Amino acid sequence: MKIDKKAFELMLEKTPSIRNPKRRLEQYETPPSIAAHILWNAFMRGDIEGRDVVDLGCGSLRLSIGAHMLGAKRIIAVDIDDEILVQDEEFLEENKYERIVLIESDIKDLVMGKTNTVVMNPPFGVVRGSRGIDLVFLRKALEIADNIYTIHKYSKGLDRLVEEIVEGFGATIVWREVIDFPIPMMYVTHRRKIYRIKTVFYIIKRRIKG
């Protein structure tokens, strides 16, 4: 595929934003630079092109659209928010992204067969009522995929817990990278123009038996 990472990031900047973000769902969009970094890593490791990809908590589809651009065979985009899925469906119909399939589901209730790759930016689990939701996403990803590309709010305790969960599923963290995640002022509770959250980008691989 004749595209470089910078050009790819510029293309992702043109993807739609969430019209009505909901704080209770922690709908913070993945910045184009971070989305491009996650997807480019997956692409270079052979986990996107020609593969089945699942985007858990797809939001406005930035990761799904990026996976489509990089040649994924099929992308299943899952979200609990029916309003955002209506927006997504309109965009897909207008732009003819025929390899992206939308599913409305709570991640806890999602039933799905095995897939090659999961890409996701799950909720950070910091809003009251959603504590630990990021680990629910992680466990679901580990249930269904051999290759997982995910980002989580950093803490030493959470990092240890992520490693324990991954090991319990017979998988391995092959890459950790600390990334500053910018969140603009978007909810009434916000008091600063931009918040910078310390996050960790994980690449997780299922161990090969034998």
Image (cartoon, rainbow, N blue to C red):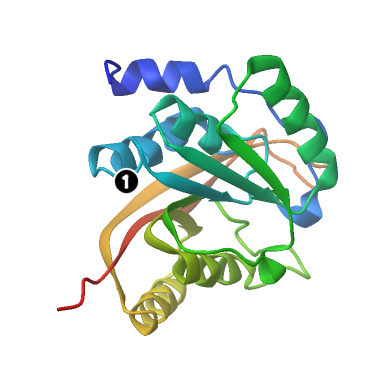
Residue 26 vs residue 66: left or right?
right
Q: Residue at x 80, y 56 (%)?
A: 24
Which one is nearer the viewer's eye here, 113 or 31? 113
Image quadrant where one finds the C terminus: bottom left
Residue pushed farthest left? 210
| Residue 27 in view, yes or no | no
Q: Which residue is mark 1?
A: 47
Q: Residue at x 35, y 52 (%)?
A: 178
Q: Secondary structure at mark 1?
A: loop
Q: At 41% across and 32% down in the image, what residue appears?
A: 36
Where is residue 168 drawn, in percent x and y? 38, 84
Q: Is residue 50 in sight in this rendering?
A: yes
Q: In this image, 199 relative to 128: left or right?
A: left
Mark 1 is surrounded, within 10 Å at the Cα level, by few (under 14), some (14 to 19) or many (20 or more) other residues, namely: many
Depth order, front residue of 190/132: 132
Residue 31 percent location from the top left of the image = 53, 33
